[in-house]
Amino acid sequence: MLILLTFSQNHLEVFTSWDVNAVLERIGSSDNIWLRCIQFRDRTAIGKIIKHFGLKPSRVDMIFNHCQMGIDDDIEDCLFDNYEILTHQKQNREFEVARGTIIVGNNFIITFEITEVKILSTLSINIQKRNINIQHLGIDYLFYLIFKDILNNYYTVFDHISRQLDDLEDEVLANSGDESTYQKIAAMRQSTRFGRRNFQSIKSLLAMMNYEDFQWLSPPVKELFNQDLVHDADKLWQEYQSLRVWMSELMEIQRDNVASKTSERINRLTILSTVFLPITFIAGVYGMNFKYMPELDQPWAYPTVMGVMVLIVIGSIIYAKQQRWL
């Protein structure tokens, strides 16, 4: 699906279609343009879009291959960024990684979304409802709003992770968790690595803004990035590192808990083996085929041997409990 948002000082218009030609025909040279390509994987059509905006043909392969994470250093024709955004899905309480590409030119932004990014959809709706007065501002301000919403999204994600870790910490410290608890923490830790890549991309952008020949942002918008987003990015990066350390500590404790339970089971099996070892010895002795075993002719021999075996078992168990082995 293609969603074309055009705006200038005089108007704001939204057009939705699957027909790339119909969308490109509605693009005017005097408008600021945000073109969202959602689950749109037609290579020929994407080639038309790239050509229409005067970008290099190699950008098509970069979009499809999604091979390079972060900001592209070659910024002659556009500002090109592949992204992986970690989002929190409230319905199933799971994390989802939204992948795609952002391309910024002099008066346009194109977002290729492999899966629809709820952050961008919410921003688009707010613009359409005039909750955000963007008509008197440039396309670079829209770029600023996109990255601001991406960072705000991570506050929600990290808050959800913190609440999950609080619950898991109670299980871990109470030693009431099992192997699945460890797997939950490990899966959560693995999913957050996408956030790290996203932060690295944002930090690359913030560093590139200070280049003298960085033409894609106006000085006022650069100031907004430096005032708001640099601080937020640093704060979120520190929180990200803290969460990673927290998860690592819980994984280590839970690993020790699992190892301790396993060791306890092995100890119990060892004690049981020790308890029955004398009985096995006695049974082995009386299982030998010697001709002269005087006690075999005595009527009290069998109950006496069985009684001795029972006393050995009871005595061994009492001794193990006194030593706190059981």
Image (spheres, rainbow, N blue to C red):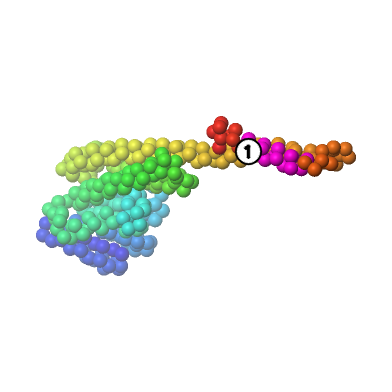
Residue that lies at the very extreme toward the front in this rendered image = 299
**Vertical relation: 18 (above or below) 324:** below
Task: Give the residues in magenta.
Answer: 301-316
Residue 49 horizontal/vertical position (percent): 30, 60
For the residue pair 312 and 253, the one nearer the viewer reads as 312
Corner quadrant of residue 228: top left
Corner quadrant of residue 169: top left
Confirm whether residue 181 shows in the render: yes
Residue 116 horizontal/vertical position (percent): 32, 59
Residue 22 horizontal/vertical position (percent): 26, 68
Predominant SS along the magenta part: helix
Residue that lies at the very extreme toward the right in this rendered image = 291
Q: Residue at x 88, y 38 (%)?
A: 292
Q: Is residue 283 magenta?
A: no
Q: Which residue corresponds to mark 1?
A: 314
Residue 110 horizontal/vertical position (percent): 28, 55
Confirm whether residue 280 shows in the render: no
Q: Is residue 314 magenta?
A: yes
Local packing at callout 1 (Cα closer than 10 Å; few below 14, some 14-19, many 20+) is few
Q: Residue at x 43, y 47 (%)?
A: 184
